[in-house]
Image: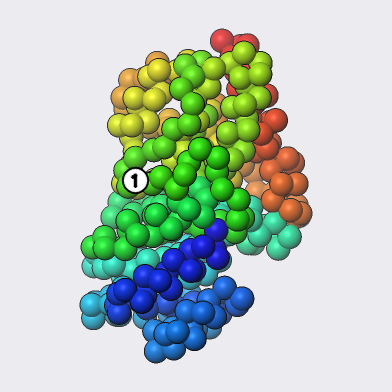
Amino acid sequence: MRAAFASALTRLAEEDERVVLLTGDLGFMVWEPFAERFPDRFLNVGVAEQNMIGLATGLAEAGLRPYCYSIATFASLRPYEFVRNGPILHQLPVRIVGVGAGLDYGHNGVTHYALEDVAVMRAQPDISIVAPADPDQAVAALREVHELPGPTYLRIGKEPGVVPGLEGRFRLGGIETIGDGGDAVVVALGTMARDAIRAAELLRESGVDTTVAIVSSVRPSPAEELSDVLQRADLAVTVEAHYVDGGIGSLVAEVIAEHGVDCRLVRCGIREMPRGLTGSPDYLKGRLGLDAESIADAALRALERA
């Protein structure tokens, strides 16, 4: 996904001279085409994410469209106060691009796992939050958020695979659904969409008609569309490579409560810090109950209890 995003941003920079790219000493083998094409619009600020956001705030105030690129934990947590007091407070079009959604940097350990980035950004009411599910959707999302007047957090994955049936569809404030089963709805955050679709296939094999709802626009909130989908199902299962608190599980719980939806909820996410646990993203998802089989089992257990 990051390669597709980088290519799309380079093309966008050719069309819009306001585009400036800042990186926190990251993106080697990804951003060279941009840097070579636009050397005056590429800034490697070094391992200084707070300074990166400060610079981007000034550039946005001057009328430019800065994109700040770093590993998701470093892009969201290290400069958090600067994000709040800069582009959010002043409603400036700074785009914060966090690469390595969830467990993508699996071999680097928990310091590189982006497990609370959505939660901390959701705590700020005036920043858009977008978590594309695959490369095609990332390109579509980039085009849609580019002209937004305020700040945006883009949660980008590393994996190149395309989500079957999604076909790059993206709408701010909306969800994308695959299937139309009424027994259960599996609600996936961004890059967990493929695991959610596989879990839905396993559930159908067990006789459970299932819909997959892909949430890539966290803010603007897709609350109304989520409510419509949830009202047609007996069970909702949220799936996220993120802590269960503050992410998509919390969003769905809020929708159920605030819209009076008669639907049970099971949250599949991470509940404790995975200290000392490293490995490939697929290995980690299996260990943490986020692979397709674990998701389907969680849904079946909830339906049996009901």
Q: Which of 174 and 108 lies nearest the eye of the viewer?
A: 174
User: Is residue 234 depicted above or below 238 in this figure?
Assistant: above
In which quadrant of the rendered image does the C terminus lie? top right
Crowding at dot 1, Cα within 10 Å, few <14 / some 14-19 / many 20+, comes out as some
Asked whether residue 257 is in view, the answer is: no
Identify the amino acid type marked 1.
Arg
Q: Which of 272 and 151 lies nearest the eye of the viewer?
A: 151
Q: Residue at x 51, y 38 (%)?
A: 165
Q: Return the x and y of residue 263 as percentages of the image width and height.
A: 44, 18
Q: Return the x and y of residue 36 as percentages of the image width and height.
A: 49, 86
Give the residue number, with chain letter if any, for mark 1: 171
Q: Residue at x 54, y 17 (%)?
A: 209
Q: Return the x and y of residue 173 as percentages of the image width and height.
A: 32, 43
Asked whether residue 233 is in view, the answer is: yes
Q: Which color scheme did the rendering employ for the protein?
A: rainbow
Q: Residue at x 74, y 53 (%)?
A: 280
Q: Return the x and y of residue 19 as percentages of the image width and height.
A: 34, 75
Q: Secondary structure at mark 1?
A: loop
In which quadrant of the rendered image does the N terminus lie? bottom right
Q: Is residue 286 left or right of residue 238?
A: right
Q: Quadrant of residue 80?
A: bottom left
Q: Residue at x 31, y 74 (%)?
A: 15
Residue lying farthest to the bottom in this orientation: 40
